[in-house]
Amino acid sequence: MRIDILSCVPRLLESPLSHSIIQRAKDKGLVEIHIHDIRDYAPGKHRQVDDYPYGGGAGMVMMVEPIANVIRHLQQERDYEEIIYLSPDGVRLDQKLVNRLSLTQNMILLAGHYKGIDQRVRDLFVTREISVGDYVLSGGELPALVLTDALVRLIPGVLSDESSALFDSFQDQLLDAPVYTRPAEFEGHQIPEVLLSGHEKNIQEWRYEQALKKTQERRPDLLEED
């Protein structure tokens, strides 16, 4: 998988993409992640990427030309199945969508900023718009990182235990069951006996029951979805 992230503040992305699971995935050659500064594609010596909105109103709008320039430059090098704009009015990100997108070979993630992007970018280039929640952030960089992290961990070979991602919360419309590690007793609190039994069938049944119980208590809406 190759992910190209477009941003006018690329330094916000550098550190999170250079550690932990994502860095190990890059070291293994399982994913390529490239950060592009939109300002590098802005005409003029001032590298301007935003301007006042037509019709007036508060805030600044990211201009169409710099974004179009970087997207077209990348499209000359390869085909992209997805050009995704991270936006609060996009489709809300969930595990089903992450699973589908994890099959993509090449994608562009566009991190908006200021008041948003010129609508013509959406009309001409964007294939999908995604939101990470019903709230507004200062820019699309954090949502781009969230999506990138969720995608990378699904790539075969990234996690040391490849089955781990299959049992994450939301994979079966259920939250994850409680998990424990050593010591077996802490300040009078014991882990459930079934986890010490070595009986795989009983353990799996217990985990399913606990996951179902937690989902019913905390996210009953998940059980109502198809």
Image (tube, rainbow, N blue to C red):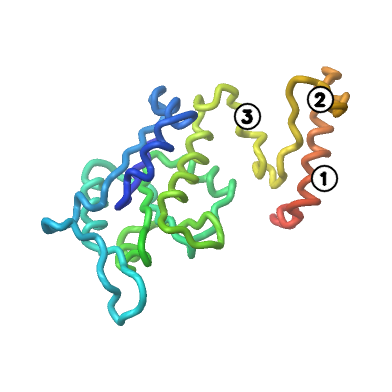
Q: Nearer the viewer, mark 2 or mark 3?
A: 2
**Disc 3 residue type (three-letter):** Ser
Q: Residues within 10 Å of mark 2 (few under 14, many from 20)?
A: few
Task: Please name the residue that numbered disc 1 is placed on.
Answer: 213
Residue depicted at x 81% and y 25%: 186
Q: Quadrant of residue 44?
A: bottom left
Secondary structure beneath label 3: helix
Q: What is the x, y in percent for residue 213?
A: 82, 45
Q: Quadrant where the N terminus lies?
A: top left
> What is the spatial separation of the Cα atoms under label 2 and label 3, in whole angstroms?
26 Å
Q: Nearer the viewer, residue 161 or 141?
A: 141
Percent coordinates x, y for residue 129 in the rendering:
44, 58
Which residue occupies 28% across, 78% down? Answer: 54
Q: Which residue is mark 3?
A: 164
* Residue topped by disc 2: 186
Tell me the mark number nearer the camera, choosing from 2 and 1.
2
Q: Is residue 20 above or below residue 104?
A: above
Asked if the residue at tag 1 contacts the one at tag 3, i.e. Cβ–Cβ closer than 8 Å, the answer is no
Mark 3 or mark 1: whose residue is earlier in sequence: 3
